[in-house]
Structure formats: C-alpha cells, structure tokens
Amino acid sequence: MTTNTLQAKEQDSLKVSVSKMLETNKTVVQEFILLAFADLHQFQNLLFVIFLLTYITCIMGNVTIIVLVRTEPSLHTTMYFFISVFSALEIMFVSVTVPRLLANLIAADNIISFNGCFTQMYIFGSLGATECYLLAIMVFDRHLAINNPLHYPAIMTHAFCIELAVLPWIMGFIINLIPTIITARLEYCGPNMIHHFFCDLAPLQNLACSDPFISNISTSLTAVFDVVLPFFIIIGFYIHIIITVLKIKNDEGKQKAFSTCTSHLIVASLFYGTAIIVYVKPEVSRYDKYLAFMYTAITPMINPFIYTFRNRDVKNVFMSSINRLIKQGSL
C-alpha cells in the first residue's frame, strides 16, 4: 500500500470523525431559562397572588361544573356532557403552564430541562388543539339539536357522544407531533433564555442556530388545521343556526334557541380571538406572553361563570345545590 493511499485513508477517517463530532455537538443546550415576566420584577409578588387566585378560581369553577353535571339528573344530556368534558380539559390545559409560572414567580425556579421543555410544549399544544376541536364538536351538537330536533335523539346516542368526545383528543395529540418533532430536531447551540412563561413553538424556533424555516411552516400549517379550520367550521354552523332560529315565529322559541348557544359563542370567541393572533403568525412579539396568558388562564377561569350565569339550567341547579348545602349546615 502506497504512502499516498495511507494518507488519503487517514484524511477520510479524520473527516468522518470530525463529522460525527459535529453531528453530536449540534445541540449543546441542555436546559432553558424561562424569563416569564422578569421585565416586571418589581411586581413579582403581586403577579404571584393574581395568578394564584386565577388558577384556584379556574380549578374550583371547572370542578364545580363537572360535579353539577355528574350529580344532577336534569343535566344528564348531551350538551352538558360535552360541557363537563370541556371543563376537565380546561383543568388540564391550565395546569400545564400556570403551576410552573407560579414557581418561577415565587421561588425563581425558571430552569427547565431540554426534554422537559419540549414535553411541556407538546402537551400544551395538543391540549390547545383538542380544545379547538372540542369547541367545534359542541357547536355541531347545538346545530344538530336546533336544525334536526326530531332526529337528534336517534343520532346523538351515548356511543356516538363518546366517539365525538374522544375524536378531538386523538386529532390534537397526533397533529401536534409534527411541529414538535421538527422543532426539537433544530440545532440549539447558543442562547437558552425564553422570553415567555412556558415553552412554546415560536420562542424556541427563535433560539435555534439552524434555519427554522421548515419549523415555522409546520407551525403555521398546524395552526391552520388546529385553530383556523375549527374556527371557520364554528362560524359556518352558527350562520346556519342563526338562519334557522330567525325562521322561528315564536319569540319564546327564539330566545330558548339562542340561550343555548350564546354561552358557547362567547367562550369560543375569547379562546380563538387570542389563539389566532399568536399562532397563525410564528414571529415572536413582545405581547405574545400576555395574549398567551389570556387563553391559557383567564379564559379557562371565566368559562365556568359564563356557563353558570348565562345558562338557566346550570344556574338553577347551582342555586338549588347552594340552598341545599345551607339547609344541611343549619341543621
């Protein structure tokens, strides 16, 4: 074997070794720092109290809805079944981000591991997508009840309701795998400070050393399927519902039909309004974390009150339960 051949082999071997070393060192970031609301450091204690009260109110309100629907026979209907599933989803959705935010504010616990960050991002995105699809399922239920009242009981059987309730979870957790995997495979070799209170797609993409173009495209496409498409489905159903209700000659019938939909319409508008602004465009804005807190905590907190105080059936059951508890306490 000639000397030139040996040198060529050594060079090839060195190139392979360097290539492998560079490949293994693509991502050197092992953890991220969640800056959250560090720019408001003088208000950290006040923010902690506000966010803690928001979280407690959200959990208690949604648990109350679930208990009322489960224990009151008059609420054992398809509509309230979906509302109880929605309340359970809200509890999980808010619990993915707010407890860590509270730890960040009170104990300066702002470090999250690489794997923990992407796990949080995947679960949060999947639950958010599930909520979008579930809201569309709920308006489909109201559309069917108003436009096909005679066939409604035969169509919305218990088994079909279960299938409709499970479908959003399957779609949400499958679709969000794509942007999560693509974003996780980016190179993270530089700054590791996230200007947000939880791990989200756009802030992580902006930290990547490699080109996040494909990741940005996957995020926007996922947002179209998870947020925009269900939103337009809801709009389409409501347009048809309004047309049908306006044809009802009885004013009492009109009011009853609208009353079953207004609560859902308010909830959907609050959630989609902020989610579309944040996710359809992947560029990071300084206001994204404030908008994110609106749909991650504020909206889940006020949803139970919307369903309680704008829904006559739930309000009557709630007041009856309170009166019953007062009478039992006075005995």
Image: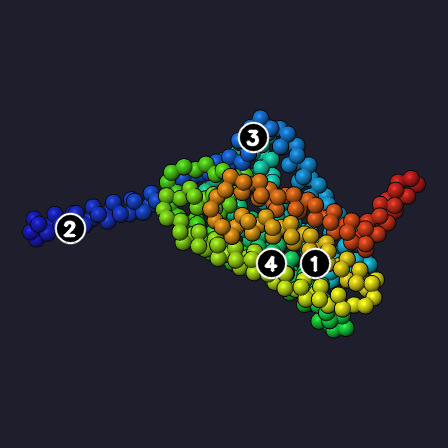
Of 109 and 281, the residue lying toward us: 281
Name the amino acid, label 1.
Phe
Task: Give the image location of residue 100, x and y in percent.
Answer: 57, 38
Task: Give the image location of residue 75, x and y in percent.
Answer: 79, 58
Task: Give the foreground label among 1 and 3.
Answer: 3
Q: In the image, what residue occupies the spot 81% across and 68% down? A: 249
> Which residue position is annotated with label 3?
40
State the CA–CA distance, disc 3 to disc 2: 59 Å
Of 12 and 176, the residue lying toward us: 176
Name the amino acid, label 2.
Lys
- Comes first in the chain, label 1 or label 3: 3
> Which residue position is annotated with label 4?
231
> Which residue position is annotated with label 1?
82
Name the amino acid, label 4.
Phe
Within 10 Å of disc 4 (Cα), the crowding (few <14, some 14-19, many 20+) is many
State the CA–CA distance, disc 4 to disc 1: 18 Å
> Which residue position is annotated with label 2?
9
Is any part of residue 157 visible from this angle?
Answer: no
- Comes first in the chain, label 3 or label 2: 2
